[in-house]
Every structure is written in C-alpha cells, then in structure tokens.
Image (tube, helix red, strand yellow):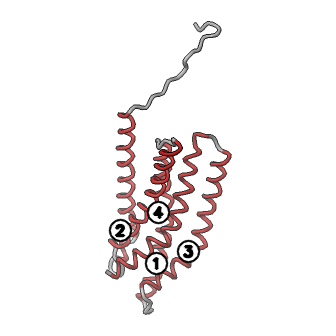
C-alpha cells in the first residue's frame, strides 16, 4: 500500500547493450529476408522477359535502388541520433520495411511498363532500350508522383499532429517514399539500361 506523498513505480523500462545488439541483428536479418524475397518476386514476375531483357539486370538495379532508399534515411537518422539523441528502435525498423515494400511497387510498375514496351518492340519496332525505358518512365510518371504525394502528405500530417511515439516513423516514411520515387526514375531505370547494355 502506498502512503500519501510516496512515489509508486508502475513501470520500468531498460534497454541494455544486449537488447540493442539483438534488435540490430534481427533488423538486418529482416531487411535481408525482405531484399531476397523482392529479388525472388522480381524474377518470378518478369520471367517471360528472360529472352529479351536480363533478369539479373532488373534484380540488381532494383536492389541497388532499394538500398539507396533505406541507406539514406538510416544515415539521416544516425545524424539525428548523434546531434538530437533520436533513437533507432523497432518502430524505425518497421518504417524501413514499409519503405521497402512501398518503393518496390513503384519500381515494379515502371519495369512492368518496360516489359510491355519491350514486348511491343519485339513485334516489329526498332526502338533502343534506353528510349523504351524513358518512354516507360514517362508513361508512369503521373501515377508515381500522385502516389508519392499522397503518402508524403499523410505522413507529414502524422509527423506534425501525431503522437510522439510515431513521429519518427512518419519522418522515416517521408524520407523513404520520396527517395523511392526518386530512385525509381533516376537510379533503377538508368541502371537497368546500363547493365543490359553491358
């Protein structure tokens, strides 16, 4: 029984180095499993293109772009942790996995349009692969911008008006989704053309 004037401890949380190391290891495992699953998915979805376009080029360009999408937010959060004591926790790991899932769909949409245009080219057109990828990006650009703005605006509302517990989840989402849209156009697509020509 607590007497008047005494303080009662209802809850105590402590995160030691062992828990932090376990979270880090499990996070890297989760991200690794996600990237392998994405590569398997890309191989399965685009298997019919193996005669006209390199599946290896598609997988490598997608994985490099996805690494771009998560390494930059991780770097920004490392700087925030150093200067503002922001901690990377399980919520941030969930944000990174969400970013991977969201941004891969953007890349798949562009590559699916590339696939359609490559198959049309096989029926008689003499377009260069670079021109086909450029045309495919332009055909999906409005959809990509609209989806990205929708997620960024809703995440910005969560960041500005949401609770403290999901504030940095929303910030990570804003960064990752913006970078995902950027990398779909300016990283994955040029890499696909460059690698295919190699």
Residue 66 x/y as whole percent: 43, 62
Which is more N-terminal, label 4 or label 2?
2
Residue 76 falls left or right of residue 142: left
Left or right: residue 158 versus residue 54 is: right
Sequence order check, earlier mark of 3 and 2: 2
Residue at the location (60% across, 68% down)? 145
Report the quarter where the C terminus lies.
bottom left
Q: Are marks 2 and 4 in contact (CB under 8 Å)?
A: no
Q: Mark 3 to mark 1: distance in Å? A: 10 Å
Q: Position of residue 97 (x, y in %)?
A: 46, 52
Q: Nearer the viewer, residue 52 or 187?
A: 187
| Residue labelled with disc 2 | 60
Choose the circle earlier in sequence order: 4 or 3: 4
- The CA distance from mark 2 to mark 1 is 16 Å
Towards the viewer: 18 or 59: 18
Q: Which numbered mark, 2 or 1, is in the foreground of this view?
A: 2
Please rate how many residues cluster around mark 2, counting C-alpha atoms within 10 Å: few if below 14, some from 14 to 19, many from 20: some
Q: CA distance from mark 1 to mark 4?
A: 15 Å
Give the mark nearer the N terminus: 2 vs 1: 2
Question: Within 10 Å of the Cα at label 1, are there few (<14), some (14-19), or many (20+) other Cα atoms?
Answer: many
**Which residue is labeled 3 in the image?**
140
Crowd tier of the residue under label 4, counting other residues whose Cα lies within 10 Å: few below 14, some 14–19, many 20 or above: many
Image quadrant in which you'd find residue 46: bottom left
- Whether residue 8 is situated above or below residue 67 in the rendered picture: above
Disc 4 designates what residue? 104
- List the residue tagged with mark 1: 114
Mark 3: few/some/many CA within 10 Å (<14, 14-19, 20+): some
The earlier-in-sequence mark between 3 and 1 is 1
Circle 1: element type: helix
Place of residue 78 in the rendered image (x, y in percent of width and height, measured from the top left): 46, 49
């Amino acid at each position: 029984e607590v007497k008047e004037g005494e303080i009662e401890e209802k809850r105590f949380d402590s995160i030691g180095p062992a828990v932090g190391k376990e979270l880090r290891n499990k996070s890297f495992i989760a991200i690794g499993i996600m990237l392998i699953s994405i590569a398997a998915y890309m191989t399965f979805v685009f298997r019919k293109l193996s005669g006209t376009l390199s599946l290896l080029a598609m997988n490598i360009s997608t994985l490099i772009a996805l690494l771009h999408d998560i390494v930059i937010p991780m770097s920004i959060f490392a700087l925030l942790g150093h200067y503002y004591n922001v901690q990377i926790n399980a919520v941030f790991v969930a944000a990174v996995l969400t970013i991977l899932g969201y941004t891969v769909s953007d890349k798949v949409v562009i590559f699916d349009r590339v696939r359609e245009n490559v198959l049309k080219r096989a029926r008689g057109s003499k377009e260069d692969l670079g021109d086909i990828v450029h045309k495919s990006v332009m055909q999906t650009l409005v959809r990509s911008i609209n989806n990205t703005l929708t997620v960024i605006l809703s995440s910005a509302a969560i960041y500005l008006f949401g609770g403290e517990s999901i504030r940095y989840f929303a910030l990570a989402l804003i960064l990752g989704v913006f970078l995902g849209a950027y990398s779909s156009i300016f990283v994955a697509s040029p890499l696909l053309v460059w690698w295919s020509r190699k």
